[in-house]
């Protein structure tokens, strides 16, 4: 198929790159000339494991432009995968989704395209958004009617940063929300070779499946952290507890790793959006509130444990191992290292941070932190706090160190002079 992808952020580029692996022709549309130039050279504008190889290999199938008319005119199917930033009240800001839909609508009109075009929303949007914001913008700008002049659907993604390509290629399921039969048909054809259950449903339901999945995974993590806090006090190994619990087929063992909580661009934002959306419609969401409360408090457990050993942090050097919100990414959005750095600097400590990929991004937020080039600079501090479980941290020698571990690095537990895990 010929596919255009609006927004060459994380989801858009991974989706386009993976679809090119099936021989589809991809045109990325973006407003950022730097991203366009990179993509046209076969270079990823974001870091994701394996992405560079695919883009280089499939250069002949991939192009990028800022011109909607040429991209829409030359393709049959368009994915909208632009950002949905958090608005002030916790809901999502649909400004980019709306503008993408308006531009697609105009292009459908300008190009006078005869073949029926399919538009699919991949951005995570609050249930109802595709059928209100996107549908309205497309019909208004194109002068066409959904279901007749164009097909409309949504197709939420379930990609985890760091393993997004693997997730795309081997999905647990594919969710297709279809406004009309056409969108369902086109996506069923696109994903025909994927051997997994396909849930074909209404658009609002598909949008809600995405939010519910993320909210449930976030709930599992906060629950594991609350139980972990109890285990820590009781001298019980929380990991062993969840091994035993997860063996129940009704429960499943994944996403029970306790520690300092969840970060990233999805869980915190999506739970907040669900909570705000529910409040707007008069629904009280006690569980979602608690999920966020536990997640806010959890990184600060590290500070309490540190204070047990160094009551006055003024002028003391504290090293942080890991700044990214999880390993294998340079992404620091909502990283749990952020509240830890804030608390440490408020207490007068001097913070030395190390991360294989994310130091540059963190330096924009905290210019006064010392960003170590070598891990040894962190190891020379008065205390070492582990905030991201990069695999290389398993190969360090922590002997003689005071270590507060937020992510369960075995080697630290084995070799540190004084070792405190947050939930173990
Ligand atoms: C998450 C979901 O896992 C994806 O399915 C979804 O597609 C994506 O959001 C999205 O909505 O786009 P992602 O944010 O990339 O993916 O990362 P995760 O691997 O889910 O980790 C999120 C956070 O939870 C990280 O800070 C991680 O350290 C933390 N986490 C994860 C835990 O603290 N414990 C766990 O057991 C698992």
Image (tube, helix red, strand yellow):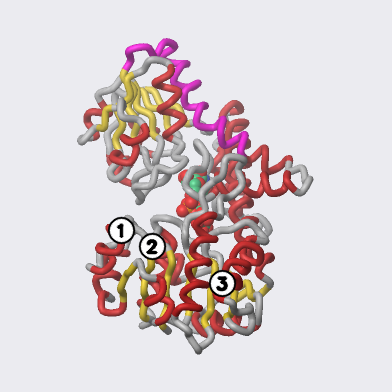
Instruction: Point out the frontmost of discs 3 and 1.
Output: 1
Residue appearing at x 52%, y 39% in the figure: 261
Q: What is the number of the mark on residue 174?
A: 3
Judging from the image, what secondary structure is the residue with disc 2 in? loop
Magenta residues? 292-316
Residue appearing at x 49%, y 78% in the figure: 108
The reply to whether dot 2 and dot 1 touch (C-beta < 8 Å) is: yes
Q: Is residue 401 left or right of residue 128?
A: left
Q: What is the number of the mark on residue 45?
A: 1
Say whether residue 225 is magenta.
Answer: no
Looking at the image, tell me whether mark 3 or mark 1 is earlier in sequence order: 1
Report the predominant secondary structure element of the magenta stretch.
helix
Residue found farthest to the right: 282
The reply to whether dot 2 and dot 3 touch (C-beta < 8 Å) is: no
For disc 2, the marked residue is 8
195 or 417: nearer the viewer: 195
Q: Position of residue 386 (x, y in %)?
A: 39, 34
User: What is the spatial separation of the Cα atoms under label 2 and label 1, in whole angstroms?
Assistant: 8 Å
Classify 10 Å Cα crowding around label 1: few (below 14), some (14-19), many (20 and above): some
Give the tally of numbered discs: 3
Residue appearing at x 34%, y 35% in the figure: 321
Looking at the image, tell me whether mark 2 or mark 3 is earlier in sequence order: 2
Judging from the image, what secondary structure is the residue with disc 1 in? loop
Classify 10 Å Cα crowding around label 2: few (below 14), some (14-19), many (20 and above): many
Q: Position of residue 6 (x, y in %)?
A: 43, 66
Q: Position of residue 188 (x, y in %)?
A: 56, 82
Position above or below: 283 against 212: above
218 or 80: nearer the viewer: 80
User: What is the spatial separation of the Cα atoms under label 2 and label 3, in whole angstroms?
Assistant: 21 Å
């Amino acid at each position: 198929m010929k596919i255009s992808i609006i927004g060459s952020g994380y989801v858009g580029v991974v989706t386009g790159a993976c679809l090119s692996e099936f021989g589809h022709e991809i045109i990325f549309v973006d407003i950022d000339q730097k991203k366009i130039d990179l993509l046209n050279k076969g270079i990823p504008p974001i870091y994701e494991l394996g992405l560079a190889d695919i883009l280089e290999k499939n250069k002949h199938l991939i192009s990028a432009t800022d011109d909607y008319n040429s991209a829409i005119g030359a393709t049959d199917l368009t994915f909208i995968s632009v950002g949905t930033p958090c608005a002030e009240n916790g809901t999502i800001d649909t400004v980019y989704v709306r503008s993408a839909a308006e531009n697609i609508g105009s292009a459908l009109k300008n190009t006078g395209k005869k073949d029926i075009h399919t538009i699919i929303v991949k951005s995570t949007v609050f249930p109802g958004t595709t059928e209100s914001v996107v549908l309205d913008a497309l019909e208004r700008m194109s002068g066409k009617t959904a279901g007749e002049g164009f097909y409309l659907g949504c197709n939420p993604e379930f990609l985890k940063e760091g393993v997004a390509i693997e997730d795309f290629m081997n999905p647990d399921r594919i969710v297709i929300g279809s406004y009309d039969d056409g969108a369902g048909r086109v996506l069923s054809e696109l994903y025909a070779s994927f051997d997994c259950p396909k849930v074909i449903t209404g658009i609002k339901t598909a949008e809600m499946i995405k939010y519910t999945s993320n909210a449930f995974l976030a709930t599992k993590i906060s629950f594991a952290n609350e139980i972990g806090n109890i285990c820590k006090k009781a001298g019980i190994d929380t990991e062993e507890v969840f091994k035993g619990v997860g063996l129940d087929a009704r429960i499943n063992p994944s996403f029970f790793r306790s520690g300092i909580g969840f970060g990233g661009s999805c869980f915190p934002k999506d739970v907040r959006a669900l909570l705000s959306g529910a409040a707007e419609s008069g629904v009280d969401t006690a569980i979602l509130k608690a999920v966020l409360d536990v997640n806010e408090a959890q990184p600060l457990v590290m500070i309490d444990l540190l204070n047990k050993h160094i009551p006055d942090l003024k002028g003391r050097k504290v090293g942080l191992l890991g700044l990214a919100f999880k390993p294998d990414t340079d992404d620091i959005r909502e990283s749990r290292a952020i509240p830890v750095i804030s608390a440490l600097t408020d207490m007068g400590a001097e913070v030395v941070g190390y991360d294989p990929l994310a130091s540059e991004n963190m330096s924009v937020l905290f210019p006064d932190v010392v960003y170590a080039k070598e891990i040894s600079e962190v190891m020379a501090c008065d205390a070492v706090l582990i905030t991201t479980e990069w695999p290389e941290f398993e190969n360090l020698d922590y002997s003689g160190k005071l270590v507060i571990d937020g992510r369960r690095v075995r080697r630290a537990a084995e070799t540190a002079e004084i070792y405190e895990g947050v939930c173990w």
